[in-house]
Structures are given as structure tokens and as C-alpha cells.
Image (spheres, helix red, strand yellow):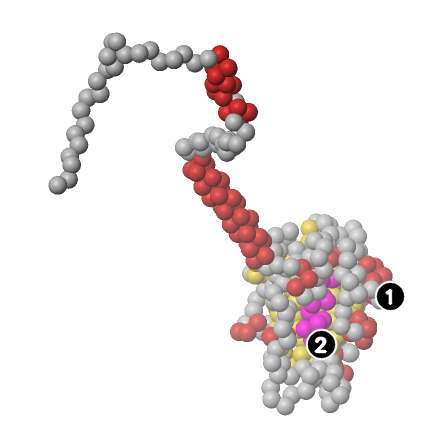
Amino acid sequence: MTEQHTTGPVSAPPEDAAPQPAVDEQGAARAAAFAADPLAANPFAAPQAPEVPAAPKDRRKLFAALRWTAAVLVFAAVGTGVAYEVTQPERTDIPGLSTKADGRWTFPRLAKPALPPGAALPFAEDNPDGIHYAGLTELLLPAPSGSAPDSTLKLEKDGVVTVDTFLEEYDATGRGKMKEQFANEGLRQIVARGWTTPDGTRTRVYLLRFHASGFVDNFKGCGALATLNGVARLQSDDAWMRAKSSQRTELGQDGAYSGPSARSASDVTLYREAKPTGDEQTALACLQSGDIQAVVLQNRKDEVAAVPLHQTVILQLQLLG
């Protein structure tokens, strides 16, 4: 049988119990020392870890807020970078451009049109006359970003313009003779594209296709003696001439020449309206490439800017090959 124990109240010691012996003075001193510094009083005791203050209750919330703030800043920075890449592509990725922002326009990436099966490239060994077999409209330089189509340019289907529309760029006194020359000297077709940029520059690019390159040599609409509508006198574009003569290969602040070959460079001439010009200046560029004669015209208040003019000419030249 298991013995049971009960717990009852603890009785106080009897009043006549013998008194406890008093602690001697040496023991009292040791007790006081132990209370003040337990390690010093007992060198064999294990050291106690220092107390670590409790973290504030809202510290976790603070750390979480900081992490989210950092994440938001990172995503904002990445998003800004992506938007910049979309709206401002690397200038080295844009045809004819370097990294300097010097007033150049942003054009779509250029691509030469596909040729009919078996057709030769212009100026290939089996095509020395430079005949272009691609569609003429496909060889037109596209308009730069941010520009608006020129509503004053009268276009037919597929960018075709009539001879009369093209001749409106020239003085009325010489139009009849030029029209007769077109009829007698193998003109096949004219296409055009025009745009106006936010700085007010109005650009028209015309491509005239002839039956052969020999007819292009007889075109009278270019040169210092060309009678443009409203222009008293033309003079050579000095910046272009300096760049071409120095054979520079980068389009810099002064509009230095850059083109696919020296042969093509010799087939390009640029002219500006001589001062005084009135409210706006006119610039004329003539590009001869095999059976195609390109005519680029720009007008701008006060003065035509050199860099976008030269850039337009260079890119159109590259498309023509």
C-alpha cells in the first residue's frame, strides 16, 4: 500500500526555539563582495552573457518599410532607364549618327528594299550603269521622328508626283523648258516625300528616275545656276565643301561629310541661298546615283541648319547605294 503524503500549512517555529547562530564578520564580508561582483567572489562561476536590450516593437515594421522604399526606388530607376532607351535610342544605333547631340534628327533604322529575283545591285560588276531595280518609293528616305507630313506637297498614289508639281519648286520662267527636257531626255517617274520638323525646317526629297544614267547627266535642275522659286542666287555650301575635301568620315558639329564612298561623294553638290535671304533661307542638294537623280530642298526661317541638311543628304545617298 502506497504511503500518502499531504501538504499542510507550514507552522512557525516555536517561540522557545533556539536562536540561529549569527553570521561571523568574515562571512558577512564575503556575502557583500559576492553581491557586488559574483565573478570576483567566485572565480569558478560561469560568466553571464551581457543583457541585450529588447528591440523596439516597431523595428520590424521600420525595416520592412525601408526594404519596400528601396525596391520602389530601384524599379523607378529601371523604368526611367527603359523609357529613355525607347524614346532616345543609342545614337550609335541610328544610321549616320555618333553619340553627340548636335541637332541631328532621329530617323528610323534604314534598310535597303528587296530586289526582284535575279536583279543586280546598283553599281555591281554586272550593273555598271547603276540601274536601280527596286521600287522608287522604297528608295525614299523616311521622315524623321517628331516631324509632320508636308501638307502642301501634292502627292499621288505611292508618293508619285507629277512633273508640274515638281516644277513648282522652280521659277515660273524656266518651267516650260525643263518640262520639254524631261519629255525628250528619258524621264520615267518622280516620287517625293516631305516633312516639317518642330524647329520649322521644311524638307522635300524628290527622286527622279531616268531610262539610263546618261540622261541624268543632262538634268538642268541642279547647280549654282538653278532657278529655284523665290531664290535670287545660289552659292556652294562651304561647310560641305570643306568636309568633302578633307575626306572626313564623321558628321560633326560643322556638318562634316560621311558617305559610303568617294565616288558617291563626287556625285553630291550642295548649295545655299546667298544672303541677304529675306525671312527664310533655301538650300538645294543634288545627288546623282546611276539612273536616279535625287533633289533635296530645305527651307528654314533665318538660316538652314547645316547638320540636319547634311544628315538628310547622307542618309538618302546611302539608300541609293
In the image, what residue type sits under mark 2? Gly
Question: For residue 321, which numbered disc appears in the image?
Answer: 2
User: Does 38 sit above or below residue 100?
Assistant: above
Q: What's the CA distance linking mark 2 and mark 1?
A: 21 Å
Residue 78 x, y percent position in the rendering:
55, 52
> Residue farthest to the right?
246
> Residue farthest to the top?
16
Residue 200 x, y percent position in the rendering:
64, 52
User: Does 75 sit above or below residue 219?
Assistant: above
Instruction: Give 134 or 151, whichever is nearer the viewer.
Output: 134
Q: Residue at x 72, y 60 (%)?
A: 98
Secondary structure of residue under mark 1? helix
Answer yes or no: is residue 132 visible: yes
Quadrant housing the C terminus: bottom right
Q: Bounds of the magenta span?
A: 309-321
Which corner quadrant of the image does residue 137 belong to? Answer: bottom right
Relative side of 150 to 282, left or right? left
> Residue farthest to the left?
1
| Residue marked by disc 1 | 245
User: Does 302 sit above or below residue 288?
Assistant: above
Answer yes or no: is residue 171 visible: no
Q: Residue at x 82, y 64 (%)?
A: 248
Q: Mark 2 Cα within 10 Å, few/some/many (few <14, many 20+)?
A: some
First of labels 2, 1 by sequence position? 1
Say if the magenta span includes residue 315.
yes
Q: Main secondary structure of the magenta part?
A: helix
Quadrant housing the N terminus: top left
Q: Residue at x 53, y 52 (%)?
A: 79
Q: Residue at x 52, y 32 (%)?
A: 44
User: Does 211 sit above or below residue 238?
Assistant: below
Say if the magenta span includes residue 129.
no
Residue 301 x, y percent position in the rendering:
69, 51
